[in-house]
Image (cartoon, rainbow, N blue to C red):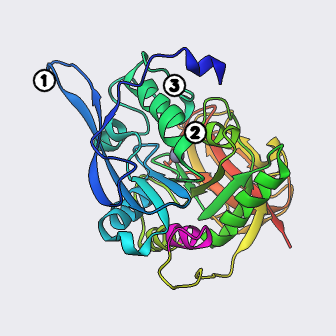
Amino acid sequence: MTATATLAPSPVMPTVDFERDGVQHGFLRLPYSRDDSAWGSVMTPITVVRNGSGPTALLTGANHGDEYEGAVALFDLARSLTADRVAGRVIIVPAMNYPAFQAGTRTSPIDRGNLNRSFPGRPDGTVTQKIADYFNRVLLPMADLVMDIHSGGKTLDFVPFAAAHILPDKDQEARCFAAVAAFAAPYSMRMLEIDAVGMYDTAAEEQGKIFVTTELGGGGTGRAETIAIAKRGVRNVLRHAGILADGQAVEKAPGRWLDMPSADCFRFAEDSGLIEACVDLGQPVRAGDLLARIHPIGRTGLAPAEYRAALDGILAARHFPGLVKAGDCIAVVGTVED
Ligand SMILES: [Zn+2]
């Protein structure tokens, strides 16, 4: 960690004391001078619930500002969790990229920063880079277990799954997948990232943490079913880690394991136009099956482009809006493990 030792301290000032027992609701205050507030700040809500010594869980939602299951589940947990039910410490940040969350957008309206591509961040960078740096150098080192709850946002929709990554440290990987299993989402995924550089996931994993992520739906909203999965999953993982000691067992749910064995899982549009879904989320597909057509919209009488599955599995994710552009991810096929 010699590279970080030379960095300036983070400008983020927490209004909570991470070493104090009990429940504290406060803010991560980040100075942000601007037209409507000369000495203003970004005020990211945070809750710390601590009870003696023990492991620390760091729970985040709305890393992307238009993903809602995590935010709902974590505002709910922050309001309801009492210290007497905790053994150790739970740090809850329901809306990690708070400016993006307030704007209802994936990236920050301040600097267009995608927080999940901004790690390790910079203490002297943009607002988004400063948030990343605070998580990387202050919050992640406190944590044993890190859970970051994503959904598809406005442009993707997923079957609900919890996920972890294949890691070089097999003991760490096994502990991550045990936590994924405890989350008990309808699906559990061995996840392949298109582009892992700059991700919070990678930062947490490189610090040796147990890391669980999710994709619980999407379309820029939350549904009753997926919010219930998030609420149950968060409590399940805390029980699994021995941090939530409420006398209840991990609530099991029948689930299926999915894998993303290669980049062949992804289908990217090479055409722009009107997308015709040919398979719905969760449906089985075979290699060669038609996943979607993209119809040209400039004139009538033209044939649509066809997009087919490259492997057998289920449709795990799809593009959400009805119009697509070349380069958009239009489908992800996950292979089913038996
Ligand atoms: Zn996300």
Q: CA distance from mark 3 to mark 2?
A: 10 Å
Q: Residue 236 in magenta?
A: yes
Three-letter amino acid code of the residue under disc 2: Tyr
- Which residue appears at 81% of the width and 66% of the height? 336
- Residue 37 locus on image (x, y percent): 14, 24
First in residue order: circle 1 vs circle 2? 1
Question: Which residue bears the numbered disc 2?
Answer: 200
Residue 114 seen in render: no
Q: Residue 124 in magenta?
A: no
Q: Along the line of sight, which residue is nearer the eye, 102 or 164?
A: 164
Residue 2, placed above or below residue 294:
above
- Residue 321 locus on image (x, y percent): 49, 48
- Which residue appears at 40% of the width and 43% of the height? 65
Give the foreground label among 3 and 1: 3
- Which residue appears at 84% of the width and 62% of the height? 286
Q: Which residues are magenta?
A: 233-244
Image quadrant containing the C terminus: bottom right
Three-letter amino acid code of the residue under disc 3: Gly
Three-letter amino acid code of the residue under disc 1: Asp
Q: Quadrant of residue 212?
A: bottom right
- Which residue appears at 54% of the width and 61% of the height? 54
- Residue 171 locus on image (x, y percent): 82, 54
Question: Which residue bears the numbered disc 1?
Answer: 36
Side (left or right) of 120 relative to 179: left
Q: Along the line of sight, which residue is nearer the eye, 37 or 140?
A: 140
First in residue order: circle 3 vs circle 1? 1
Side (left or right) of 99 relative to 161: left
First in residue order: circle 3 vs circle 2? 3
Question: Which residue bears the numbered disc 3?
Answer: 121
Q: Secondary structure at mark 2?
A: helix
Q: Secondary structure at mark 1?
A: loop
Q: CA distance from mark 3 to mark 1?
A: 26 Å
